[in-house]
Amino acid sequence: MNGAPSSSIPSEALSLWLALRRLPGVGHRTQLDLLEHFGSVENIFSAGAGLLEKALTGKPEAIRAILAGPDAPALQTELEWLREPGHHLITWADPGYPPLLREIPDPPLMFYVLGERALLSGPQLAVVGSRNPTPMGRENAHAFAKSLAAAGVTVTSGLALGIDGAAHRGALEAGGTTVAVAGTGLDRVYPARHRELAHEIVGHGGALVSEFPLGTPPLPENFPVRNRIISGLSLGTLVVEAALQSGSLITARLATEQGREVFAIPGSIHSPQARGCHALIRQGAKLVETAQDILEELGPLASLTRRATPENADAVRPLDPSMNALLEHIGHDPVTVDVLIERSGLTADAVSSMLLQMELNGLVSSCPGGKIQRIS
């Protein structure tokens, strides 16, 4: 395999980043502390023993690894993987690091991406739930994801069986985009029966994401860890169905700790798969009955995702002619939704959906009194 890696990181720095992640006995929080202390990954590996001993007290193996420098043969598999088109390594120093993910308490130092990396800085909603959903739960996940994707929101989930898979497929059916955060290295797909789904996600403009090195198997402890990335990339998390001991409740708890919205769909009081959602609602999650309930909440939050670099403009889809026509009806003075419905002749649902996408694109903003104003 020839050529430079497709990652935005200079080739000479890639080995340093990969070596930093492999330091023995050093977790990602300490790795971030090292970067803050020394200023760059290059400065870490050029520091002398004395400075390293002050920064890594009690970690002689890590100090020896830094002084020895990157082990190129051990990193060769990952370097070759990164040479493939659409294969990326996004690091903490990358200006394209997703701004919402950067804000969480324990952001990953770096992570791998297969597919459209700019999508990760656009508006996303996490959709999670049971691996063994009821038929209605599966249908709800598919329908909610389809509506959200049609409105311009990227659906983010974990590629698992059940609700995750239904959400990814709903987004794809709408012609929208979806992100799958894996609990393995990106050189493998788990579960194996979702291999075709993973290819569809990437082939239709989405992305696969993992902070785990290539070759990492689906260890049970990986999945609670990756859940913080699912919620951390997203404006909010929707729990479709979950038992009281479901891992989806971990994702919801993480979303709350990260200051993100949590939504839950209620179910039958007799269904074990509804009890987790009911518990979340009692704890303050927003009860939702339609995707429109979520879209109304997400609109004012969309500006949080517009702190990315210009390269992320590719993640925003152009407006279709009907949306451009609606934009003309808005003008530059604040106007109510009811007035827009009257001017345009469109339904309330159509106008609300179009307004959300326009707000996500930075074309309009919400004003006091429920009015909408065009942004010059």
Image (spheres, rainbow, N blue to C red):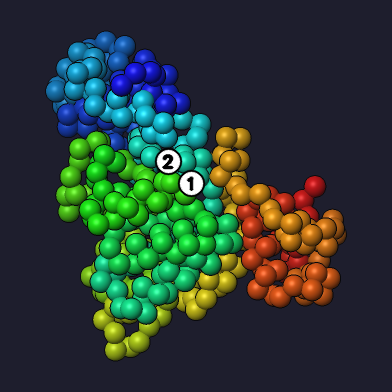
Q: Position of residue 309 (x, y in %)?
A: 58, 35
Q: Quadrant of residue 255?
A: bottom left
Q: Can the viewer see residue 187?
A: yes
| Other-residue count near label 1 (Cα within 10 Å), few / some / many at <14 / 14–19 / ≥20 | some
Task: Report the residue at 37% width, 29% height from top.
Answer: 84
Task: Report the residue at 36% width, 15% height from top.
Answer: 12
Q: Which residue is mark 1?
A: 205
Say above or below: 74 vs 157.
above
- Where disc 1 sits, the SS reads loop
- Where disc 2 sits, the SS reads strand
Q: Are marks 1 and 2 in contact (CB under 8 Å)?
A: yes
Q: Quadrant of residue 366?
A: bottom right
Q: Position of residue 236 (x, y in %)?
A: 47, 60
Q: Position of residue 358 (x, y in %)?
A: 68, 56
Q: Amino acid at mark 2?
A: Gly
Q: Amino acid at mark 1?
A: Gly
Say above or below: 1 vs 154.
above
Separation of marks 1 and 2 at Cα, in angstroms:
7 Å
Say above or below: 26 vs 264.
above
Q: Can the viewer see residue 103?
A: no
| Other-residue count near label 2 (Cα within 10 Å), few / some / many at <14 / 14–19 / ≥20 | many
Q: Which residue is mark 2?
A: 115
